[in-house]
């Protein structure tokens, strides 16, 4: 039996980085806030200023984690990815947060929270590594 990876990212650079990081295989399920050729399911886009959409995204994360029962959840952000990290943690799943390469001076707002919930929290900039955040190289 193969391991199922749930790969989640917001549109734009987050999704590009995720697609570069995780290959499209039968055991990888891609979820994003927009429809594209590799996306299996779409979730609501949310941010700190949209609390109702954020709540809906948490509900969707619970639904999709229960539906697919992944062995691991990986995300490159942003807040929709954080919803999956937190829900995954609560459901006992392994989770990986990869902070966006665009965040060179400090972790993203979501990354600052993810480091407390993710099984592994990664930065793409060595100067941002800390006790809870590891540097293992860049994606792009």
Image: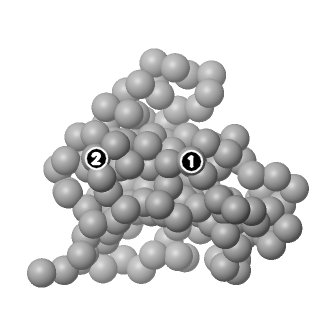
Residue under label 2, please give it: 91
- Residue 114 in the image, given as x and y percentages of width and height: 57, 48
- In the rendered structure, which disc, 1 or 2, sits on the residue that comes first in sequence? 2
- Quadrant for the C terminus in the image: bottom right
Helix, strand or loop under label 1: loop
Up the image or down, 136 lies above or below 15; here it is below
Query: Measuring 45% from the left and 18% from the top, which residue is drawn there?
Result: 52
Of helix, strand and loop, which one carries label 2?
loop
Whether residue 23 is visible:
yes
Q: Nearer the viewer, residue 74 or 30?
A: 74
Residue in the image at 62% along x and 27% along y: 48
Quadrant of residue 30 in the image? bottom left
Answer few, some or many: residues within 10 Å of disc 1's Cα (few below 14, many 20 plus, some between 14 and 19).
some
Query: Badge 2: few (under 14), some or many (20 or more) residues near its Cα, within 10 Å?
Result: few
| Separation of marks 1 and 2 at Cα, in angstroms | 15 Å
Counting from the top left corner in percent of width and height, residue 61 is at 33, 42
Residue bearing mark 1: 116
Residue 65: give x, y in percent of width and height: 26, 50
| Left or right: 18, with 140 as reference point | left
| Residue 105 image point, x, y percent | 87, 56
- Asked if 60 appears above or below 10 in the picture, the reply is above
Tell whether 35 sits left or right of 25.
right
Labels 1 & 2 near each other (Cβ < 8 A): no
Q: Quadrant of residue 109?
A: top right
Q: Residue at x 50, y 71 (%)?
A: 19
């Amino acid at each position: 039996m193969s391991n199922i990876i749930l790969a989640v990212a917001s549109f734009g650079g987050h999704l590009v980085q995720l697609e570069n990081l995780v290959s499209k295989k039968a055991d990888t399920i891609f979820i994003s806030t927009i429809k594209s050729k590799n996306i299996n399911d779409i979730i609501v886009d949310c941010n700190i200023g949209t609390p109702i959409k954020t709540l809906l995204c948490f509900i969707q994360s619970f639904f999709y984690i229960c539906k697919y029962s992944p062995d691991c959840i990986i995300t490159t952000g942003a807040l929709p990815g954080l919803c999956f990290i937190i829900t995954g943690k609560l459901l006992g799943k392994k989770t990986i947060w990869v902070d966006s390469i665009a965040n060179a001076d400090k972790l993203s707002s979501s990354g600052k929270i993810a480091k407390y919930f993710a099984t592994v929290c990664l930065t793409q900039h060595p100067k941002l590594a800390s006790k809870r955040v590891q540097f293992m190289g860049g994606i792009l």
